[in-house]
Amino acid sequence: MKKYYLVGEKLSHSFSCDTHRFCGLNYELSELSADELEDFLKKKDFDGLNVTIPYKKAVIPFLDEIDDIAEKIGAVNTIVNENGRLKGYNTDYFGLKYALTAAKIELKGKKTLVLGSGGAGVAAARLATDLNAESVDVVSRSGEINYENMCEKLDTQVIINATPVGMFPCEAAAPCDLSRFKKLESVFDCIYNPFRTRLVIEAEKAGLKASGGLKMLVAQGLFSERLWGETNDFEKKIPAVYTEIIGKEVNIVLVGMPGAGKTAIGKIVAKKLQREFFDTDEIVLKTTGRTSEEIITKYGEERFREAEARAVNSLSRVRGAVIATGGGAVLNPENVDKLKSGGVVFYLERDLNSLAQNNRPLSISAPISRLFEQREGYYLAASDVKIRNDKTAEEAAEKIIGEFFK
C-alpha cells in the first residue's frame, strides 16, 4: 500500500489525516527536526508528501524538479516520488484561490496586505498579483513593511494572514489590530485550527467578510491527491471532505433564554450525531457543588458569572461536541469568543410564554419580557444561526443538524 506523510516541525494541530484518510489513503504525520529532514527525504521511503511549517522552502534543495508555480513562489508544500525522482509543487496557491472564491472574497482591484513572508505568504502574494489586486504588500518581521509599521497601510481593503499567529494552542493571539484599517472589507486567515481564529472573530464583529482556512486546507490537500495520482475528480470531493471534518472537529453551541430548551435539544443533537454533550450549568454544579440558583441566591449573580466563565473556559479546547450554555453566558464577550472559536453558535428562540421558569432565579425576579429585551441583542450578536423552538424538541434538533451541515 502506498505511503503518504505530512512533514513539519509541530503537527498536533493538523487535520490533514482527516482529509486524506477519509479518501482512503495510508497517511501519517511525521514530526521532524531540521536535522532529521534531509535524511527523511534522501531515504525516499514514501510515495508522496505534504510539507508544512517551517520546511516549505527547506525541502527545495533535495528535489529533482519543481513545477512552474512552486518555482515562482519559492515554496513547496507537496512532493511526488516518481520512481525515485522527487518533484515539488505548491497546492497552497490553488487551495487559497478555491477558499477565497467560496468565501466571496474578491482580490481583483483591491489593495491587499499579506501577513507573513513564508511559503503560504508568498503563495498568497503570488495569487493576489495573478488575480489583479490593485496592490500587494507583504508584511514580514524584518522587511520594509513589518509588524511595527504595517498599520500605515491605512487604505488596505483585504488582509490575508499567512502566519501561524492565532493557531492552536495559542488561540488568544492575533497578528494585527483590525480597527486600525478603516477601509478594510475582507479578512482571510489561512489558519484552520481553531475553526475561527481571534482575527476572524474580530473581523466578523466589525461586519467584514471573513473566513478561516479549513476549506483552503481541504482544497489544497485534495489537489495533492491529484498530483499523487490518487484522484481525477478532486474538486467534486471538496464539499464532502469539508463536511466530514466539520462533523468531527467543530462544536455545536446553543445559546438562548433560560428555559428555551438548550439542554434538552442539545442532548438530542448529541445523541443523533454521537457526540459528547456538555452543559455549562452542569459544569458549574460539578466544580462548585452548588446549582446556579443556589449561587445566585446566596452569593449574587456576579459570583455565578465568574463560575460560568470558568466553565466556558474549560470547554475552550473541546472539539466535536455539543455545548448548551446558560441563558446569560453571552453577556461576557470573552465567553462568546471562546465558544465561537471552536464552534458554530445557534440561537435557540422560543415564545416567551413557553419558557420554563422553574429553578431560574433571574427569570423569576423580573418580568421575562424585560430579561428578553436586555439579552436579545447579545444572542443575535453571538449567534451564526437562529433556530425557532416552537414545536417539538426533536424538530428543533433536526433543524440544528440541517443548518450545521449546510
Image (cartoon, rainbow, N blue to C red):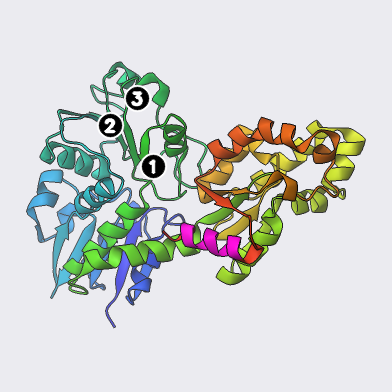
Question: SS class of the residue under badge 3?
Answer: loop
> Viewer-nearest of labels 3 and 2?
2
The x, y position of residue 308, in whole percent, is 73, 42
Q: Amino acid at mark 2?
A: Val
Q: Residue at x 62, y 66 (%)?
A: 394
- Say if the magenta span includes residue 171: no
- Residue carrying label 2: 158
Callout 1 secondary element: loop
Tell me the amino acid under the disc marked 3.
Answer: Tyr
Label 1 sits on residue: 164
N-term mark: 3 or 2: 3
**The C terminus: image quadrant:** bottom left
Name the residue located 40 percent from the left edge and 50 percent from the top edge.
192
Residue placed under numbered mark 3 in the picture: 147
25 lies above or below 123: below
CA–CA distance between discs 3 and 2? 16 Å
Sequence-wise, the earlier of marks 2 and 1 is: 2
Q: Range of the magenta residues?
A: 395-403
Q: Secondary structure at mark 2?
A: strand
Residue 383, located in which quarter of the rendered image?
top right
Give the side of residue 335 with respect to residue 154, left or right: right
x then y, percent, for residue 307: 77, 41
Are the residues flagged by discs 1 and 3 in contact, CB closer than 8 Å? no
Q: Is residue 155 left or right of residue 242?
A: left
Secondary structure mostly taken by the magenta-highlighted segment of the chain: helix
Residue 105 x, y percent position in the rendering: 27, 40
